[in-house]
Amino acid sequence: MVDYKKIIRDLIFKISYEVSDDCQCLLDRAVEMETDASSKMILETIVENVNIARECKQALCQSPGYLTAYVTFGEDFFVPDLEEILKEAIIDATKIGYLRPSMVDPLTRVNSGDNSGRGVPNMEYEHKKGIDYIEVIPSIKGCGIELYNKVKVFTIPEIGDNYEGIKRFVLECVCEAGGTACLPSAIGIGIGGQVDVAAKLSRRAMSLRGWMQRSEDKRIAQLENELLEEINSLNIGSGGTGGKVTTLSVNIETAATHTTLCPVAVNFHCWVARRAGIRLYKDGRVEELSFM
């Protein structure tokens, strides 16, 4: 019988002290390509921090972030109470010291003391036909960088030729955030739907897709590459000290929208990619996912 509690608990512990494989690769690559001395030193320190956290099983970052769990399941498949299991795992990780207790009531600001609270974790479920597993991807996203996230609802003329209006909006967000956005960042962009859909897509863009993967839609992939190049040409650099590496990745997800408008959400993610994924099959097999 599958021990869901142990599997999920171990997964939450792991993402508290270990970045995902794509993030590790991009950070290593950033160190090699950076030529600015100050920015390179910051990147080297980040990589050292990542290695120490993994080896010593200590928290990657003082900010525990906010956990969203993405659950995909097939037909005729028993789905356990994953929300309750995840809640318990978060509390256990906090008690042990992997996560700092930072969840508070939004109005009274009273801290629960163990990262429990209404809406924690945030759960997103998706049913897919033809699969014989449950896929669980918990993603912890730092909260300080949330200060720089923005949403804009574009009119059709504002979008511009070759999406120039959207690109300008993204670049303005990056410039406004400057060097205080936990750089090097990753940027998720949601385009379409209504405001709530665009915001959700912007988070999914960073949490579910590997940071080294481009969109399967060639138009979107080109826009991702253009924005990545333009952002890194701003010379903001890691830690805001100047340099070639301001962001590690730009991921875009889209949805159909109304004929009169186009919502766009820009979602900053710090360099700490705390996420992992597993698939639990009907025959008891457990497969660990890669984001490469």
Image (cartoon, grey):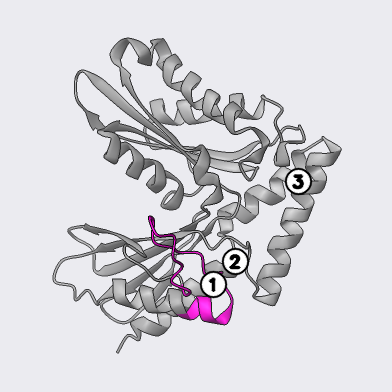
**Towards the viewer: 95 or 260:** 95
First reached walking from the N terminus: tag 1 or tag 3: 1
User: Which element is circle 1 on?
Assistant: helix
Horizontal side, residue 48 vs residue 193: left or right? right
Amino acid, disc 2: Glu
Q: Is residue 17 above or below residue 186?
A: below
Distance from disc 2 to disc 1, alpha carbons, whole Å, reads: 6 Å
Q: Magenta span has 231?
A: no
Question: Looking at the figure, which quarter contains the N terminus?
Answer: bottom left
Residue occupying image coordinates x 61% and y 50%: 271
Q: Which residue is mark 2?
A: 18
Q: Which residue is mark 1?
A: 14
Residue occupying image coordinates x 46% and y 67%: 111
Give the magenta part as a residue range: 92-114
Q: Position of residue 183 (x, y in %)?
A: 65, 43
Residue occupying image coordinates x 75% and y 32%: 243
Tell me which corner region of the image, top left, top right, bottom left or bottom right, holds residue 190: top left
**Towards the viewer: 246 or 93:** 93
Q: Position of residue 13 (x, y in %)?
A: 52, 75
Task: Mark 1 vs mark 3: give the one in front.
Answer: 1
Horizontal side, residue 196 vs residue 265: left or right? left
Amino acid, disc 3: Val
Residue occupying image coordinates x 49% and y 19%: 168
Q: Give the label on residue 31, or none.
A: 3
Horizontal side, residue 260 vs residue 19: left or right? left
Q: Say few, some or many: other residues with alpha carbon within 10 Å of mark 2 (under 14 / 14 to 19 / 20 or more).
A: many
Distance from disc 3 to disc 2, alpha carbons, whole Å, reads: 18 Å
First reached walking from the N terminus: tag 3 or tag 2: 2
Tell me which corner region of the image, top left, top right, bottom left or bottom right, holds residue 32: top right
Amino acid, disc 1: Lys
Label pair 2/1, CB-CB below 8 angstroms? yes
